[in-house]
Image (cartoon, rainbow, N blue to C red):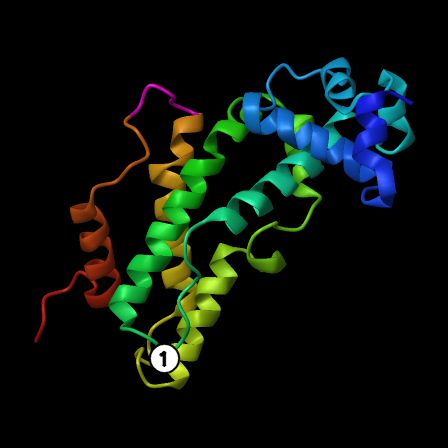
Amino acid sequence: MAPRRAAALRGGEQSLREHLVAAARALVARCGTAGLTVRDIAGEAGVADGVLYNHFADKEELLAHALHAHVRAVEAELDGVPPRPGEGTVAANLRAYLERSLALHAAILPAFAGLTTQPKLLARLGDLPTPLHGGQGLRADLAGYLRAEQGLGRVAASASPEAVATLVVGVCHDLVLGRLLDPSGPPPEPSAELVDALVATLLHGVLPGD
């Protein structure tokens, strides 16, 4: 057993499978997934190349689990916690959700660079549950928050939590993940004024008042 692998596994803290995922995650965080080889991952893990196939069907399955772990870790490192129903104002909470989601998407963007050219890896990633918000995903988590606020009478009963949550997630995809397709585009750092305008639009819609 290589010394680095032996140190990583000492005391039974990690299984070999977990060690491989952790090594692949470290590579993905540094370099993204484009061009990574089995030899690269094995070298990072301190194991022979063939060991990977004892635990994963192929390189793409391992990288999918590594991306999954990376997203979970990035989310856990974000400042603050998602707003709770009944606390603060709905406007401030929507802004916090939007800012937190934009920060998350911007932080994971480098690891996803080149993913659009790897359909097999995309398929493997699609086989896994969402890594965000304990498996709920951003959209379901925000929709659940809004439904709770409806129960408290702080959001109109006629509002659609699912529609609002879809709009918020769509904004993140448009402002941040669009850079995957157009790396030459503007940086994924929307201005405070744009965030304010988005929250105002979510709260008040687009039709003139009575």
Query: What is the quadrant of the C terminus in the image?
Result: bottom left
- Which residue lies most toward the bottom here? 152
In this rendering, would 86 be left or right of 196? Answer: right
Is any part of residue 61 visible from this angle? Answer: no
Q: What residue appears at the point 48 percent right and 70 percent down from the top-left corner?
A: 144
Question: Is the magenta region chiefly helix, strand or loop?
Answer: loop
Against 106, is 153 above or below? Answer: below
Q: Position of residue 146 (x, y in %)?
A: 40, 72
- Looking at the rendered structure, the kind of residue marked 1 is Gly
The magenta segment: 181-185
Against 89, is 39 above or below? Answer: above
Against 73, is 116 above or below? Answer: above
Give the quarter of the image for residue 44.
top right
Q: Between residues 48 and 99, which one lies in front from this camera angle?
A: 48
Q: Position of residue 122 (x, y in %)?
A: 63, 32
Q: What residue appears at the point 32 percent right and 62 percent down from the top-left corner?
A: 94
Q: Position of residue 29 (x, y in %)?
A: 57, 29
How many numbered marks appear?
1
Element carrying mark 1: loop
Query: What is the quadrant of the N terminus in the image?
Result: top right
In this rendering, would 113 be left or right of 15? Answer: left
Name the residue beneath numbered marker 1: 86
Q: Between residues 43 and 173, which one lies in front from this camera angle?
A: 43
Q: Position of residue 154 (x, y in %)?
A: 30, 81
